[in-house]
Amino acid sequence: MKIVKVESFLIDIPWKEEVRKYMAWAAQGSRTWLYKVHTDDGIVGLCENPRDARGLASQLIGRNPFDFILDDSVWPLQEALYDIMAQALKVPIYKVLGHKYRNKVPVCYWSHHFPPEVLAKEAIKAAEEGFTVHKFKARPHYDPVEQVKAISEAVPEMAIIPDANGSLWLPSKAISFARKVERYNIFCLESPIPQSDVEGYLTIKAKVDVPIAIHMGDPDPIISLATDMVDYYVLEVPGVWSTFRYAAAAEVAGGTMTASGAEGKGYTVGGRPVWLEGFGRTAIAEAFQVHLAAVIKMSTLPSPFFLHRLREHTLAEDPLMVREGQVEVPEKPGLGITLDERALKKYLVS
C-alpha cells in the first residue's frame, strides 16, 4: 500500500450567528484546512487542521502510511495516515494508537470571552446538548466573577473552568478571584497567572482550595512536575508522539488516582490527571482526538474538543454525540465518522 495523492481543501465555516460578533476577537479564525490522503488501493484518510500542510504532501507520496507511526514530522497529516492504517486493518483508530483505557471520553463545552449574558445562554445550550462542564476564556474585557455567576445561575449543576491564560497576572489577584468564585461549582482554574511564575503558582495552590491547571510545556515539565505546582495538566501539543511523551510525564507526577477503565474495570495509577486540547475546528479533527484521549491513561478530565458546536456545520454526516458529559469512542474502522461531502463543497474557499 502506497500513498498516491494528497488533496487539500481550504474551507470557511462561519460561526453561529449568536456568537459571531464575539468570535471576531478570537485568535482562531473561521477558516481551516481539510485534507484527503489517497492510497493506491482506494483508501482515503481524513484530517482537518487550520495549519497549511500542503508542503508536507511530497514527503508522503510513494510511501506506506505505516512508515509514519509516531512520526510527528508529518503532523497534522499524521492524523489522516492513522485513519488509513486503521481502515486498512479494519479497526478503529484507537487500536492502532494503543491500549484503550476507557469506552467513553469526558468532554466539556467551550466558549470564548463572551459577556455574562451570552455565557448564560451558552451554558443552557451546553446543558441541552449533554455537557456537564463549561470552559470559558476569562479576560479583562468582562468581570470573570460575573461570568462565573452567569453560568452558575443559568445552569447550577454545570461545572465551570475559567481559563485566564495568565491574564490575572498576579498571585494576589488569582487568589482573590478564586475565593470569590469558590462558592460556585468550579471544576478548576486554568492558567490564572503566567505559567513561568512557579513561585506564584505555589503561593496560589497553598492558599486556595480550587484545583489549578496549566498547559504542560511552560515551564519545562521537569520544573513543573518536580515542584508539584499544579493539580492538573492540559496537553496541547502537535503530534501523537509528543502527546504520548507529555502524558507519560504526567503519569509519574504527584500522588495516586483511581479511574474507571474500559469494560468498567478500574485502575489506580500515580500521577496528575490531564485533558487534551486539539487544533482542529470540525468533527473530523474531534473524532481523532477522542480516539487519542481513549488510549492515554491519565486523560480522565473533560477535554474541549467540540469547538465545531460554535459553527454552522460540523463537516460530518454523523458527528459524535455528547451524553452526560461523555462521548463514546467510535468502533467503526478508521475515524468512525463520515465526511459530509455536500458541506465540504458548500464551505469550500479553494
Image: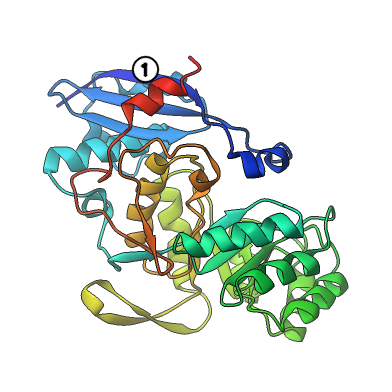
Residue closer to the observer: 210 or 107? 107
The quarter in which the N terminus is drawn is: top left
* Residue 40 vertical placement versus 276 (above, below): above
Q: What element carries label 1?
A: helix
Q: Which residue is drawn at 87% across and 74% down?
A: 172
Residue 91 sits above or below residue 40 on the image: below
Label 1 neighbourhood size at 10 Å, few (<14), some (14-19), many (20+)?
few
How many badges with numbers are in the image?
1
Q: Is residue 75 shown left or right of residue 228?
A: left
Query: For this rendering, which residue is in front, 264 or 193?
Result: 264
Q: Where is residue 339 in the image (x, y as percent from the top left)?
A: 31, 33
Render colour scheme: rainbow
The residue most toward the top is 350
Q: Can residue 165 be seen in this view?
A: no
Instruction: Please give the name of the residue rendered at 79% of the width and 55% of the height, measured from the top-left corner.
Output: 139
Which residue is at a point 46% across and 20% down the rendered structure image?
Answer: 348
Where does the image place residue 217, in percent across and percent down from the top left?
60, 56
Which x, y percent locates residue 151?
A: 67, 67
Q: Nearer the viewer, residue 236 or 133?
A: 133
In which quarter of the view is residue 216 placed?
Answer: bottom right
- What's the residue type where badge 1 is placed? Ser
Report the residue marked by disc 1. 58
Instruction: Give residue 34's quadrant in the image.
Output: top left
Residue 191 appears in view: yes
* Vertical placement of residue 191 versus 58, above or below: below
Q: Is residue 90 above or below residue 81?
A: below
Q: Position of residue 60 (x, y in %)?
A: 31, 23
* Left or right of 250 on screen, residue 206: right
